[in-house]
Image (cartoon, rainbow, N blue to C red):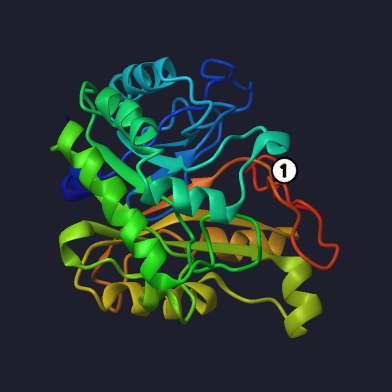
Amino acid sequence: MTNRGDGRLRAALGAALIAAFGTFGVAAQAAPPGTVPYGVYDPDGDFENDNEVVIEHLFLPWEDVYLPSLNDADAYARERDRALLVTLEPWTWSRSERNTAQYLRRGISDGSYDGNMKAVCDVLATLESPVTLRWGHEMDDDNGQFIWAGWKPEDYIAAYKRMVDICRTSAPNITVMWSPLGDDGMQDYYPGDDYVDLVGISVFGLQAWDQAKFGRDRSYEEIFKPRYERAAAYGKPVVVAELGYVGKREYVEAWDNEVRQAKPEYPSLVGVAYFNYPEVYPWPEGFGMPDWRVKNQILD
């Protein structure tokens, strides 16, 4: 690998493409200015040729997963000297066939889902790129979006540990990211130092939401700082695993100029990964599904 970016990050993080690997957009995009290592979830391939990107982020469901997409992603990342961050969601992406939280919790506990985890991790073990696994993210968010979120902390921790143990048996060289949303209460779900190599948080800025709820625009740092401080308390490297922002030009430019700035007050921050895709679930109270893609994020 080259010396581009932070070596610790490239050895720890990763990302990839969804099953639609290979369908690329026409317009190229560039990472925001700064020195913090940058990653993308980028199904449209907008950052295909951006040498600043050192992390490729992949989201996978474990029930209807297309496992060869991991090999495709590995090849894509190696060609660009990028690491892989694999977010594995414990459900199916077919909404009409999803189980309940109770069914998932019971199935993990009794071993019914061990095979799902092992199948993915058996493939992760064969990849040549540095791989980080992010399983069951944003478990501290109880808004009803994820069937693995909002559980009793002891139930989530038991499930998380079981899945990490299975994956490490298949793929002992992976890095593991524990990735809450980052609000107060996330600490209840911490599984212990032995099960966390990196701590991920999520930071999204929607100008319309800020104006409606706070009567003003919020900066990236205003949202990021308290979440970073909670995450950094564990003494692990911290990553903004999901980042997105949408609004008028001045709002977007202000965020652009903040998100990759390395500051001495954030010594544990080792990377940010942009979610370059439209929102999948509606924001509450009628705020719709923001289009986080950088080519559409300015609403002027």
Q: Quadrant of residue 39?
A: top left
Residue type at tag 1: Asn
Q: Quadrant of the N terminus?
A: top left
Q: Could you tell me which residue is drawn at 51 percent across and 48 percent down?
A: 104
* Quadrant where the image shows the C terminus: bottom right
Whole-percent x, y for residue 21 in the image: 51, 19
Callout count: 1
Counting from the top left corner in percent of width and height, residue 245 is at 63, 58
Q: Which residue is mark 1?
A: 296
Q: Is residue 165 above or below residue 22?
A: below
| Residue 94 horizontal/vertical position (percent) | 66, 32
Residue at 28% in and 50% down: 162
Mark 1 surroundings: few (<14), some (14-19) or many (≥20) residues within 10 A: some
Left or right: residue 96 compared with residue 104: right
Q: Is residue 177 visible?
A: yes
Q: Nearest the camera: 248 or 15? A: 15
Q: Residue at x 33, y 55 (%)?
A: 160
Front-lying residue, 163 or 51:
163
Is 107 located above or below residue 188 in the figure?
above
Quarter location, residue 124: top left
